[in-house]
Each structure stands twice: as structure tokens, then as C-alpha cells.
Image (cartoon, rainbow, N blue to C red):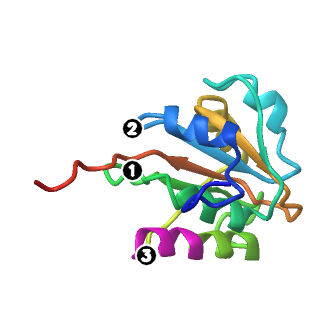
């Protein structure tokens, strides 16, 4: 255990988050997402796991991970097939964690299911959660940490 770091963040996840650079994508996926096969196509090339609900995982990750403020798609959700404007409870919970981490409203864009799969394959890595509710799949583009003020 380390002070100040959410205990959900295991060593493999911490290493991946630290290695990622500005503009790299992170996928946080539910248990039904084809995480292993997609993760094999990512930069990291292997699956990471945090067995917890999606909102808890997002809260832990965003406690360390800056979102990219230079793009409109830094936070994205997989849209429901046939209902692109519907936002299920799992996505509402994650939206609250994003807003809390950023200290302001930070909207997620919606991404069609197969387009989301393609974005995921190009990501740096995939973290599969223990989330069993459908459409608990998210993409986060890494931003920058500014230098300390002098």
C-alpha cells in the first residue's frame, strides 16, 4: 500500500498510466467487452484488470490521470445500440466521477459501438473492470500535467 494512491490502482495499472503520453487513449471496459482480444492489439499488448465497478475504477484512475483539454473527445462512452442519446445509470455514475475529478462539468461524447471497438484497438491499453452492467465502456485521452509555478 502507498499513501495517497487509491488502492484499486495495482502496480501494472500504475506502470501503464505512468508510461502513457499526451494524446494516448485509455479504455476502461465492462466485463462483456472483448477486452482480452482488443487489448492484444493495443500499444501495451496485454490486458489490465481492476475488479471493481466502472465508476470506482474511473474515480481511481482520474485521481492520477489528466484528461486532454485540447480535444473534444477526451472522455467518451460507448453508445447504446439503437438508442444513441440514452445514458444508462453506469454512464451517469461515471459522468459524476469525471466532473468531480475535473472540478467542473466535462461532457462525454458518445461513440457508436463498432467505432468504439476501433478506437479501443488503437489505444495504449485496456483496463477491464468488474462492471457487469451493459455499456460500462469508456475511453479517456491523456492530457498533460503543467509545470510547477516558479
Task: Say which of 56 and 2 sits in front.
Answer: 2
Which residue matches tag 2?
22
Q: How many marks?
A: 3
Is residue 40 among what the camera can see?
A: yes
Q: Earlier in the sequence, mark 3 or mark 1?
A: 1
Q: Is residue 37 left or right of residue 39?
A: right
Please report the bounds of the magenta region as a residue range. Answer: 96-104
Q: Residue at x 70, y 66 (%)?
A: 56
Sequence-wise, which precedes: disc 1 or disc 2? 2
- Kindly give the residue lying farthest to the left in the view shown: 150
Classified by dominant secondary structure, the portion drawn in magenta counts as: helix
Q: Is residue 103 magenta?
A: yes
Spatial CA span between label 1 and label 2:
7 Å
Residue 125 sits inside the magenta stretch? no
Classify mark 2: helix, strand or loop.
Answer: loop
Q: Which mark is residue 68?
A: 1
Work out how far the residue at label 3 is from the one at label 1, CA to CA, in angstroms: 14 Å
Identify which residue is drawn at 44% across, 69% down: 106
Name the quadrant of the N terminus. Answer: bottom right
Q: Can residue 109 be seen?
A: no
CB contact under 8 Å: marks 1 and 2: yes
Q: Residue 117: x, y in percent?
A: 70, 38
Residue at image location 10% in from the left, 54% down from the top: 150
**Residue topped by disc 3:** 105
Q: Relative to 25, is 94 above or below?
A: below
Gap in angstroms between the C-alphas marked 2 and 3: 21 Å
Amino acid at each position: 500500500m502507498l499513501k495517497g494512491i487509491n488502492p484499486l490502482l495495482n502496480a501494472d495499472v500504475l506502470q501503464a498510466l505512468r508510461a502513457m503520453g499526451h494524446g494516448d487513449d485509455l479504455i476502461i471496459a465492462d466485463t462483456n467487452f472483448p477486452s482480452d482480444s482488443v487489448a492484444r492489439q493495443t500499444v501495451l499488448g496485454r490486458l489490465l484488470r481492476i475488479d471493481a465497478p466502472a465508476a470506482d475504477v474511473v474515480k481511481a484512475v482520474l485521481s492520477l490521470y489528466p484528461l486532454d483539454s485540447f480535444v473534444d473527445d477526451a472522455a467518451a462512452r460507448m453508445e447504446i445500440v439503437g438508442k444513441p442519446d440514452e445514458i444508462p445509470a453506469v454512464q451517469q455514475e461515471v459522468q459524476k466521477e469525471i466532473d468531480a475529478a475535473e472540478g467542473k462539468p466535462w461532457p462525454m461524447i458518445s461513440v457508436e459501438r463498432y467505432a468504439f471497438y476501433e478506437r479501443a484497438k488503437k489505444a495504449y491499453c485496456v483496463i477491464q473492470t468488474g462492471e457487469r452492467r451493459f455499456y460500462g465502456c469508456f475511453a479517456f485521452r491523456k492530457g498533460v500535467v503543467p509545470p510547477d509555478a516558479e
